[in-house]
Image (tube, rainbow, N blue to C red):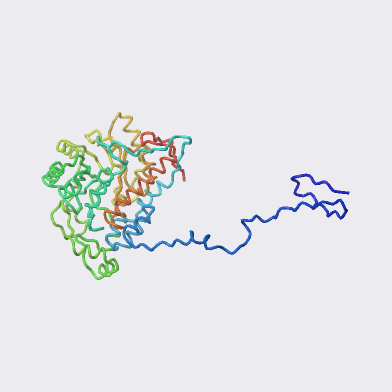
Amino acid sequence: MTQTIEPGNPEAPTRPADTGADSRPATALPDPIPAALKRRVPKYSDLAPLMQFKKPEFSRAARLRRASTIWDLRDMAKRRTPQAPFDYTDGAAEAEITLRRAREAFLDIEFRPGILRDVSRVDLGTQILGKPSRLPVGIAPTGFTRMMQSEGEYAGSQAAAAAGIPYTLSTMGTASIEDVAAAAPDGRNWFQLYLWTDRDRSLELIERAANAGNDTLMVTVDTAVAGARLRDVRNGMTIPPALTIKTVLDASYRPAWWFNFLTHEPLTFASLSRYTGTVADLINSMFDPTLTFDDLDWLRETWKGKLVVKGIQTVEDARRVVDHGADGVVLSNHGGRQLDRAPLPFHLLPEVSAALKADHSDAAVILDTGIMSGADIIAALALGADFTLIGRAYLYGLMAGGRAGVDRAIEILEKDMLRTMALLGVSRISDLTPDHVRLLKK
């Protein structure tokens, strides 16, 4: 008697062997181990494609290519730059609470993507202060930039021009207005101004900026006195940098920085007279703590181009500077380098944007402080910013590799922005809305 087995029943009993004369060969059951999982001795033809060892690369270009984030560039910058100039860039005021909070603010959000949108082509172009920018980010004014790396403002302005974005030269820059204009003749150059007690000297800088083709003047208003930048104090940071036993030892294993420092023109504030002392002493002695809105009126009458006020930290002040003629405001707490525990520009952004719209103002809302990725920039644009500025993010690239490092920083941010926009389901900057970002409650 034979036993019937239903097809596809794995628990059915196996068919016993039939020893009768009429028996037929039993069907062999499949091997339970797939052929691909059986052990075997590998063939050389299988191993050859896997044994393509890359030749080690130690060039600056190779190092920069390996950097995938601004934080990677920061790590490279720290290895290549002496402590005093690195801390001048990396540090902030007092306990550095503001800087830490500013960066955390960008982390404490949730993106809300849309699906089934055509994002085969993402356009990051935008308009800022009457002219186009290929990306919604520009380079913020930074002082004493050639101390970080000898190419300094020249690298920043040329990289910005190549990327099609604005570059802002600081009053405390280490390249002159005219030299930056010559270095980046096709770039969109802005000038940042600290108003001094001596108005004639301020007027001279304004005229030089206009004659050099700068179309935007950015006046900084949050430096009535210098912030307590304790890293600089502990490092004995002076202008020019003092050569002590500590600084010599610190620079000794960073030969490229040391060589550049010794073989290039001595560092000075190119727009100022030669000065010897600390940065804080310079601010406290030269910049005017008596500034009022009347001075902004004077500046508006004097400067015929676009006027932007940097250092806005309240809705009321944003409205007032616009009423006094500003074409734009920069929501900024000076990168956390002035007042510690200051308001966070990213948190202030929705309120300022809404207030200016309620006033039917077309003033540009620009944001800086805390930006370390392209996703940070997209979040700011979604919450109401028209534009953003980067300071430390590009300086890390500068310290990591000069002009090529700044190019790499901009490239990293651009790739971040393109990816974030596509994943949000947005193909144009103008399509970003507050619905794309939710601030998480702690």
Where does the image place residue 339, in percent across and percent down from the top left? 30, 50
Question: How far across and down, in percent of the image, does residue 438 sit?
Answer: 44, 40
In this image, 245 relative to 382: left or right?
Answer: left
The image quadrant that residue 85 belongs to is bottom left
Relative depth, front residue between 433 and 313: 433
Residue 262: horizontal and vertical position, in percent? Answer: 19, 65
Determine whether, in the image, residue 91 is placed left or right of residue 216.
Answer: right
Instruction: Identify which residue is drawn at 86% across, 48% down.
Output: 2
Which residue, as the protein is rendered here, is positioned at the far front? 21
* Quadrant in the picture for residue 231: bottom left
Q: Is residue 69 found left or right of 215 in the rendered image?
A: right
> Residue 230 versus residue 435: which sits nearer the camera?
435
Residue nearest the viewer, comparing 93 with 84: 84
Find residue 419 and report its horizontal and vertical position in percent. 41, 44
Q: How many marks?
A: 0
**In front: 431, or 387?**
431
Residue at figure coordinates x 29%, y 57% from the top left: 401
